[in-house]
Image (tube, coloured by chain):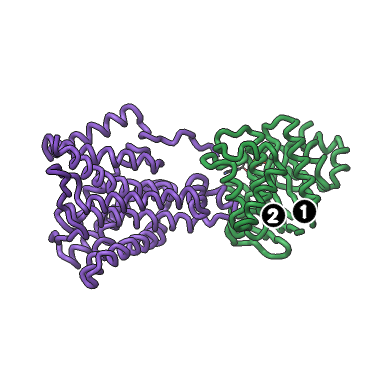
Chain colours: A purple, B green
Amino acid sequence: MDRLVFLLSTGLARGAVLALFALSLVIVWRAARVINFAQAAMAIVAVYVAFALTAASGSYWLGLAGALAAGAVLGALVERGPLKLVPRDTPLPGMIVAIGLVMVLQSGLAIAFGPDHRPVRAPFSQRPFLLGDIPVLSAYALFVLLLAGGVMAVLALLFGRTSLGLQLRAAAFAPETSRLLGVRVPRMVTAGWMLSVATAALAALLLVPTELGLNPHAADLLFVNAFAVAVVGGLDSPLGALIAGLAVGVLVSLVTGYVSAAAAPLAVLGLLTAVLLVRPGGLFAAKEARSA
Amino acid sequence: MSTLTIEDLTVAYGDGAPVLDGLDLHIGDGTVLALLGANGAGKTTLLRALTGLVPAGGRVLLDGADLTGTATEDRVRGGLALVPEGRSTVVELTVEENLRLGALWRHRGAARRAAVAEMYELFEPLARRRHAPGHTLSGGERQMLALARALIARPDVLLLDEPSLGLAPLVVAQLLGVLRETASRRGLTVLLAEQNVTGALSVADRGVVLSLGEVVADRPAAALAADPALRHAYLGF
Ligand SMILES: Nc1ncnc2c1ncn2[C@@H]1O[C@H](COP(=O)(O)OP(=O)(O)O)[C@@H](O)[C@H]1O
Ligand SMILES: [Mg+2]
């Protein structure tokens, strides 16, 4: 019982990172109708940028800003570069490009930085606070929760309350109608990619200190889990990504704590399958089939 | 106040025969032109070609400026607006969001709010449903929203594709009334594609009949309405 609070709080922090990465997949799916299989590789490139910046300047915050910027730039480059070269009316060519990109980026990183895990220090302690003698949560987990929550709130405001957000949503739902209303749809698609990869980069940056360290493949498992989370949430639904992400994070934490780490993936698989059996389109499937 | 000139406009889909073949048409300042023709005559194709949604040969001039090769969104920002067939409500957005979307590039801040308020005055049913999601609107409300969303950007030339399709006669009369009144007040140039010949000619200054991609009649609206032979030959009644 004395571990429950700690397992729940670390589960929420882990879930917030998962939700953030899943949200990044939702954003790019809505903007471009693409499942970006290169999201993890692109995010990790941005984390290497952060790593290098932090190593050179000694500032974690400069590294964090660098990861966001690098993610945004990389998102724009990929959307304006390789993806422009292939037909977009069917999803497969884009998918192949993304898979090719994974190989290029990950081998590039391995050549430049070596394949080893580089230890990355968290900006705050990972040892839990104690309340009496009950562990509650670590400063780093609190930081992760606050930052991920803050970024999701900012994204919600951006999409829900600003003119840019209105154009991003309209361009995603109804590109032709949007163009007829003067919206520069290609720019909105690029903006969606930039937001998406920057968000993924932040999630990967937050994850790395809690794992083995930085390595070209450090976000691969995060991608797999976040993809499942995004599908279960309903690929079009940011709220679905948030709820499913938190649920999976807490589940993994509880099963790891009370049963074993090996049982956690099975528990996740069980939960996801159960949800998809009941709601094949995900928790928050788009209700209205588009007609125009 | 604007003129639209169409020169030698040619459109073909895929390898098929041209749907429009060398079409010429000039629409003068502040004219409401009814574009009539049976199903498949090429009305939608013409309007989509004018806005750059389908590639076309020939030239389209807006106030003398050649639009050839420009993107749809730039033509729209240049003063051309299309209310497409099927009403095209963005169903995931609310009424107000749909309206604001139409106003974004034209108005900012207080001017944008004033423009939205003006549309609510013009189309009162929309004001009552301003926070309703688009997918809950009736056909008539959707068509009002589509028209308001185009008018809010203060276009110089307004293209409409069968706005009366599937609507109750009373709603059609209302819509066409607002259209005529706004066009006169603003000096708007209008190209109104319709199969509802009587309705369209009742608000138009001039009528053009399109058949198999060619202009087969071009007369003052009143003269066209009074010509039963022509109606019978090309409009099927
Ligand atoms: N996307 C398309 N692909 C192929 N043919 C089309 C397409 N759209 C329209 N057509 C053809 O072009 C002709 C004119 O159609 P359209 O412009 O929709 O006429 P209208 O709007 O007057 O009913 C028709 O023969 C139609 O079958
Ligand atoms: Mg048509």
Res. A11 visible in picture: yes
Tell me, for residue B154, which label it has, or none: 2
**Where does the image place residue B106, in percent across and percent down from the top left?**
63, 58
Tell me, for residue B186, which label it has, or none: 1
Dot 2 or dot 1, earlier in sequence: 2
Q: Quadrant of residue B142?
A: top right
Q: State the residue in front, A99 or A246.
A: A246
**Where does the image place residue A121, in percent across and percent down from the top left?**
17, 60
Q: Is residue A66 left or right of residue A136?
A: right
**What's the residue type where badge 2 is placed?**
Arg
Chain letter of mark 2 equals B
Vertical arrangement, residue B74 with respect to residue B18, above or below: below
**What's the residue type where badge 1 is placed?**
Arg
Q: Same chain for marks 2 and 1? A: yes
**Crowding at label 1, few (<14), some or many (≥20) Cα neighbours within 10 Å?**
few
**Crowding at label 2, few (<14), some or many (≥20) Cα neighbours within 10 Å?**
some
How many numbered discs sit on the rendered protein? 2
Q: Is residue B136 left or right of residue A15?
A: right
Q: CB of residue at label 1: within 8 Å of ligand 2?
A: no
Q: Quadrant of residue A10?
A: top left
Q: Is residue B237 left or right of residue B103?
A: right
Vertical arrangement, residue B71 with respect to residue A58, above or below: above
